[in-house]
Image: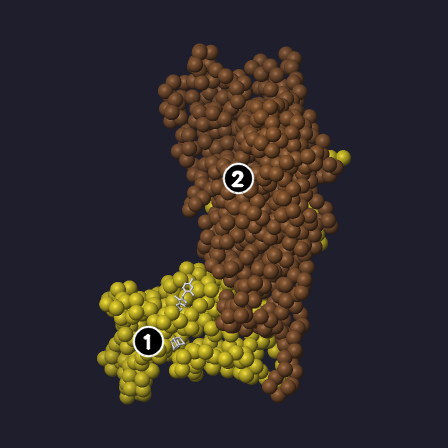
Chain colours: A brown, B yellow
Amino acid sequence: MATEVKQLDRVIIRFAGDSGDGMQLTGDRFTQESAAFGNDLVTLPNFPAEIRAPQGTLPGVSSFQVHFADHDILTAGDAPDVLVAMNPAALRANLPDLPRGATVIVDTHDFTTRNLAKAGYDANPLDSLDEPGSPLAEFAVHTVDLTGMTVGAVKEFGLSRKDASRAKNMFALGLLSWMYGRPTEHTEKFLHRRFSRVPDIRDANITAFKAGWAFGETTETFAVRYEVKPAPMAAGTYRNITGNLALAYGLVAAGVRSGLPVFLGSYPITPASDVLHELSKHKAFGVTTFQAEDEIAGIGAAIGASFSGALGVTTTSGPGVALKSESIGLAVMTELPLLVIDVQRGGPSTGLPTKTEQADLMQAMYGRNGEAPVPIVAPRSPADCFDAAIEAARIAVTYRTPVMLLSDGYLANGSEPWRIPEVDDLPVVDPGFATATNHVSTGKDGAETADFWPYLRDEATLARPWAVPGTAGLEHRIGGLEKGEGHGDISYDPANHERMVRTRQAKVDAVADSLPPLEVDDPSGQAKVLVIGWGSTYGPIGAGVRRVRRSGHHAAQVHLRHLNPFPHDLGEILGRYERVLVPEMNLGQLSTLLRARYLVDARGYHQVNGLPLKAAALAQAIGELVAEAEGVPLHELDLTAATSQEVHQ
Amino acid sequence: MSTTADLPSPTLRTGTDGVPAVDPDAPAQTGKEFTSDQEVRWCPGCGDYAVLKAVQSFLPDLGLRRENIVFVSGIGCSSRFPYYLDTYGMHSIHGRAPAIATGIATTREDLSVWVVTGDGDALSIGGNHLVHALRRNVNMTILLFNNRIYGLTKGQYSPTSEAGKVTKSTPMGSVDHPFNPVSLALGAEATFVARTIDSDRKHLTQVLAAAAAHRGTSLVEIYQNCPIFNDGAFDAIKDRDTKADAIIPLEQGQPIRFGAPAEDGGGSRGLARDAGTGGVRVVDVAEVGLDALLVHDATRDDPTTAFAISRLTDAGYLRQSPIGIFRQVERPTYDDQARAQLSTARDAAPGDQADRLAALIGGGDTWTVV
Ligand SMILES: Cc1ncc(C[n+]2csc(CCOP(=O)(O)OP(=O)(O)O)c2C)c(N)n1
Ligand code: SF4
Ligand SMILES: [Mg+2]
């Protein structure tokens, strides 16, 4: 049977199943296949906080969404075109997100009375597909006994029924790989590597994967295959990378490019733990990882390492930052280089451990006692975590200061293609250790002696010297008590404190002198509305802005890498636009900072549901401002007008 | 799915191995060289002075380069200590010195790392870091100044204050049960645990020398008098008339005896095993005979006896306390092992760092766009 092949320019697939069904792995493999094929892509994993939430229940559903395209895309997509549901709960939990006409592939095997009940279905929705009022009426549903076929396909390996059915995710992957013409050799190699120690499991998985492909090819269930051509991309070698992996690599790179040993002091916490896991593999680069007894010890040890001449790093999420606050203050006072990495999650308190949010900006900015300014940098996409880590290290080392890096759960686990940089092109960070005395004191008898003043500053950066133990003649004591200007001895002098508070602030402000001008994305030059954001909202904001532009109207976009200090030209840029919109996954933290600092009428757009912003909703919000500013009625803006992302439907 | 890996077993050495020594031809170091130009600001009569003097005159004995010595402290009166020594130092935040020192000791094998802390600093706010440093056995020496009170905050009871203690925050007497720092350290499986007294310069110096020579975390509890807020807390063990009965001296290889001299010149009381409880009790030497006495052995791997001895410390007003080295055993240190893992990994991955970085970031499934 000749299957029809349809051309699409982009597709969003969501794999959903029980947390034990291996959906993250399935999605990840599909992603790698798509990356190897040359599509642009963005992914959105979504999983429960419980390791094994009760099987078959709605809270136990884990999903992985991948958006891949023949052109450059910015988000994981608002709504899936295809849902693969491995059980009733996965179907029920994900249906509300599907647009009319979406394709649904259901593993019928688990649609038993018991599992239907666990998912809250009174009756099997698959039994009433063609009846009016069916919850599935709007969709193109394919019912397939994926599990049963998997068990049949792997019979020869003599696995228990349970182990055999575990390979069903690979069957599903094989089927979807066929459907979208994905290359399969990477997945086969991967399965060989992953299960090299358990040959029968390895063979069962590979067989299930191939059987899924063959099923697609031979059965008549699926009449259409789809083709999504590779996306044009700049020349280079690419890999797909998650934010946490990119962040870890960035830290290793910062060590190599500074010549400093990296010391990570950390306490496990979702969604930051993977950075600890990854860095613990890179001892050959001189990376020490210390799993501390708590967050305070993690940062304390990192401060000790920095004092000793290492690049001290601590990784955590919001609750951990709360515990580290006092120690960050110590690093501000002692003016030691330190990276504090906050992979934000939903808060307050324990909040939503596995969901994303960007509500720790104020905590990073002000969450300490006293005037304790700290530079803040934020990556905008998973791959950008690599560059952001190196930039944070540059600021920390150059200015002898703790630096906060704000990633988030979406960046941490989401992925995108990354053009692998040349090592020689990466920034070089110069530790510039102090090696000699820097001051001459005159004794009571008039005799002059050379000595070392730990708080004599560099004129341009206001950074103090970094003299590490083992350097003869530079012995000195630092600590959390106020330091006397220059000599660094304890000082309770009011005028000195005033000067030191202002100097510490001036030093952080001076970081702005080292920043490049902001990139303003305003292609027509006619925009009256500026949309400004930070962190992981870059993709959705960009997609929203594109939609407005496609409707024939104008909007400008600026995305901030540096949140403290703000770049010098930010005020002037804000002043150029009639309206400023600040979309954030919080209740208005950047907008508050911008209003306070620049007295602009920055308007907020807020979403705190643990998920990334949606492009369509953002386009609507931007459109409203554009309509207002351009003096056209809102309904004249066709924001649903097909973006190139949506022509296939 | 748990697996256990073989760990490198670094050859055990002394606490200061790897720390550069002074040039043998250079003039001997003096205590004055270790004295900074900062004015010492403790109250008159504070026990901290005596400890400072002892440490300043002891440090030259180590024969280490001054720039390779680091003192880290927390917050409290005693934690001002680093300012008065002309070494590298950090006066950090309340309770966190062991954590900071762990970072220093792990990063740099060539540093001699010292922690100065108080009973509140180490046992209250920093209790967690203390026990974890001890269990990890990070190569450092912790001097715990125990004045059984919060000095710096002007006299609240501390985790070592006796129950019933009347202080500003406990006008009707404290209802907290106190910690015994030595018992706590032994419970955390510390490899070196000792107790000494601020005013006994000779004993203090001996203990410091042994602590510094020990590779791993050495915990030294120093009974320190605070004449302002807890004066006389240690009078019984300092007073000429009572101290023989109050101090139970622990001397390696010697039967443990104290109290008024018996005919043979040794103490008339001693420690013996209690067959009934399995613990250790105070006995009359004349009654039980010399052979029944417990011979002190701090190097015994099993900490049970050391713990039993530590329990003879009065929890209330201090009328009796064992003094000396309770435990001194060898166990690989955290920092040695962490560094050994680094060098094993480095040996297994030779070549230029930049090339290896290129290989790392260029690994995984890649594709090339031309
Ligand atoms: C986070 C924090 N909490 C409380 C304090 C106040 N504080 C300073 S020292 C101290 C107690 C010190 O007692 P101890 O460790 O016994 O030292 P001492 O002064 O007796 O030598 C307290 C509560 C502080 N500095 N920081
Ligand atoms: S308050 Fe007590 S411990 Fe503190 S300096 Fe004065 S005497 Fe010493
Ligand atoms: Mg005290």
Task: Identify the subunit bearing mark 1.
Answer: B
Specify the label residue B230 is tagged with.
Answer: 1
Image location of residue A214, percent across then percent down: 60, 20
Residue A132 position (above or below residue A18): above
Please give the residue where the numbered disc 2 appears in the rendered image. Answer: A604
Q: Residues within 10 Å of mark 2 (few under 14, many from 20)?
A: many
Asked where in the image residue A402 lies, by quadrant, the reply is bottom right
Image location of residue A554, percent across then percent down: 65, 32
Query: Can residue B245 be seen by looking at this rendering?
Result: yes
In what element is the residue under mark 2? strand
Residue type (three-letter) at the residue carrying disc 1? Asn
- Determine the quadrant in which ligand 1 lies: bottom left
Residue type (three-letter) at the residue carrying disc 2? Gly
Whether labels 1 and 2 share one chain: no
Q: Depth check: A47 or A99 in front?
A: A99
Using the numbered discs, state the Cα–Cα distance from disc 1 to disc 2 in whole angstroms. 58 Å
Residue drawn at the location 49% of the way across and 22% of the way down: A107
Residue drawn at the location 56% of the way across and 63% of the way down: A502
Image location of residue A317, percent across then percent down: 49, 48
